[in-house]
């Protein structure tokens, strides 16, 4: 009974949050637009040489995806805090970690999945070599959920602060460093013809670990921040 | 009650910690400052020049103790943060929060002296090497803890949130280190070993040990002094603070 009620609440929360995003679907495209802008800045700043651009392409795309995710982190709990539903989640009998996992999942579905769909376009803009595209997509597929999970912990700590933008970046970036290194590093290794599966496996292992631990940490952080 | 346990319980009470820290401070600083001064003097003038690096290596006597401190202080902060979150001891919150600025200062000093040392030896101020990058991330973590603590109005909620961040960072630092190790490395390995033979000349070891212990005592002194002030500030409406401050004036 308890299990079914937790799962019912989980799916209700998913449906509600996805519906909320769908009603304001213009906003949901902002991260993609931002990543597109970041990627556009690089050829303008560095110059349009194809060889240079294809060299930096994996790193730039990873950085763009990371920054776009970082900017959208703030929205994860913002509206719920304002309308009071976050406090209801804290008081609800369902496990808080599961509910917050739902929030993180919605964040990933609405910011990272559009970015993943746009990634081939970004790769083409920077002349990424065609054989590297599957590696990039795979690394993003494993890496972006990690970014959302870790970001959820950090954003839970800063919930309720009015201007948390800069602080959020300062808190999240040190935690993003390994993900960025492994994610962008494996594409760079593949570009040099080196084995790259090790980094992908590490990302996968990190994901398996954090899917369990990060929601628990998010719940703890939120309880600290909301008391 | 067991005397050790009793001592811990007594220390948890702000007035007795305030008095105890006040009694310890002159001793800590009194031993630390001569040790640091002697270590610096011996490192600069007494120790022979290195056979490869000449006089440049002398910055090691600042760089290495500062680097050790930057990691040690993070450990002390994380342990206090853990105690603060699990047993909700107010004193540990204060101790953890007061570790952060000292640790950040030592980390900044490590990066600065490392850059000054790197220029003549590696021919560059900075390189994206594993140790350098982890040290930089460590500095960001310290700054994050300080920033989060400063950003929340309620002091106890701020301390608990920042303590939690310090703990997350504690898990993160080894991961960052290994990930950048895999990525790129140039910094030399360890030359000082606690057990077995160090690959460093014995004449250089004595000043280094003096500096290592001197900085540790100085850190404890500085931590106690800062915590005394923050305790007095947090309890400023209490009677004992007024009495203690009046006794000083």
Image (spheres, helix red, strand yellow):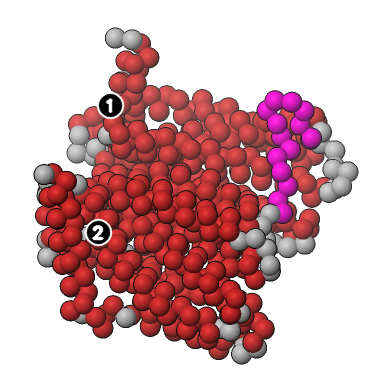
Task: Name the residue at 74% across, 26% down.
Answer: B196
Tally of numbered discs? 2
Nearer-the-camera pick, A61 or A212: A212
**Do the residues at pointers 2 and 1 share their chain?**
no
The residue wearing badge 1 is: B13
For residue A117, the mark is: none
Q: Main secondary structure of the magenta part?
A: loop
Going by the image, does A51 lie left or right of B74? right
Quadrant of the rendering where the N terminus of chain A is positioned = top left
Give me the chain letter of mark 1.
B
Give me the chain letter of mark 2.
A
| Residue B149, above or below B30 | below
Find residue B186 and report its image quarter: bottom right
| Residue B183, above or below B96 | below
* Residue B227, horizontal then vertical, whole percent: 38, 37
Residue at far right of view = B51
Residue A227 visible? The answer is: no
The residue wearing badge 2 is: A102
* Residue B3, horizontal then vertical, whole percent: 35, 11
Going by the image, does A100 lie left or right of A12? right
Task: Name the residue at 53% across, 85% down.
Answer: A124
Q: Secondary structure at mark 1?
A: loop
Find residue B37 and report its image quarter: top right
Going by the image, does B24 lie left or right of B84? right
Task: Name the residue at 68% across, 63% down.
Answer: A194
Q: Secondary structure at mark 2?
A: helix
* Residue B180, horizontal then vertical, whole percent: 60, 55
Find residue B94 and report its image quarter: top left
Bounds of the magenta segment: B186-200
The mark closer to the camera, 2 or 1, is 2
């Amino acid at each position: 009974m308890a299990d079914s009620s937790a799962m019912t609440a989980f799916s209700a929360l998913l449906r509600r949050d996805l519906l909320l995003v769908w009603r304001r679907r213009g906003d949901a495209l902002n991260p993609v637009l931002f990543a597109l802008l970041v990627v556009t800045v690089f050829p303008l700043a560095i110059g349009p040489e194809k060889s240079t651009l294809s060299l930096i392409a994996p790193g730039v795309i990873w950085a763009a995806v990371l920054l776009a995710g970082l900017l959208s982190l703030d929205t994860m709990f913002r509206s719920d805090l304002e309308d009071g539903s976050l406090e209801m989640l804290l008081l609800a009998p369902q496990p808080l970690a599961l509910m917050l996992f739902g929030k993180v999942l919605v964040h990933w579905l609405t910011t990272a999945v559009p970015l993943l769909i746009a990634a081939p376009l970004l790769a083409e803009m920077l002349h990424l070599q065609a054989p590297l595209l599957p590696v990039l997509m795979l690394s993003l597929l494993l890496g972006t959920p990690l970014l959302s999970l870790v970001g959820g912990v950090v954003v839970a700590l800063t919930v309720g602060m009015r201007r948390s933008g800069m602080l959020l970046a300062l808190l999240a970036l040190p935690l993003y460093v390994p993900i960025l290194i492994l994610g962008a590093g494996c594409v760079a290794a593949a570009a040099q013809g080196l084995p790259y599966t090790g980094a992908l496996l590490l990302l996968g292992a990190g994901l398996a670990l954090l899917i369990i631990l990060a929601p628990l940490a998010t719940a703890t952080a939120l309880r600290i921040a909301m008391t | 009650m067991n005397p050790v346990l009793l001592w811990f319980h007594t220390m948890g009470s702000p007035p007795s910690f305030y008095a105890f820290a006040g009694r310890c401070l002159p001793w800590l600083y009194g031993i630390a400052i001569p040790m640091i001064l002697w270590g610096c003097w011996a490192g600069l003038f007494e120790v022979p020049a290195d056979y490869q690096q000449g006089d440049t290596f002398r910055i090691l006597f600042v760089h290495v103790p500062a680097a050790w401190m930057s990691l040690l202080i993070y450990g002390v902060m994380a342990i206090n943060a853990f105690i603060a979150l699990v047993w909700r001891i107010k004193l540990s919150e204060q101790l953890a929060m007061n570790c952060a600025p000292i640790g950040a200062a030592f980390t900044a000093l490590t990066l600065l002296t490392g850059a000054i040392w790197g220029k003549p030896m590696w021919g560059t101020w900075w390189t994206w090497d594993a140790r350098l990058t982890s040290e930089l991330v460590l500095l960001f973590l310290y700054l994050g803890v300080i920033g989060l603590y400063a950003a929340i109005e309620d002091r106890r909620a701020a301390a608990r949130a920042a303590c939690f961040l310090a703990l997350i960072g504690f898990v993160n630092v080894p991961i960052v280190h290994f990930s950048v190790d895999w990525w790129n490395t140039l910094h030399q390995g360890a030359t000082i070993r606690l057990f077995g033979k160090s690959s460093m000349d014995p004449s250089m070891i004595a000043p280094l040990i003096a500096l290592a212990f001197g900085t540790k005592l100085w850190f404890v002194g500085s931590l106690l002094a800062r915590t005394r002030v923050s305790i007095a500030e947090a309890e400023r409406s209490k009677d004992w603070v007024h009495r203690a401050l009046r006794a000083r004036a």
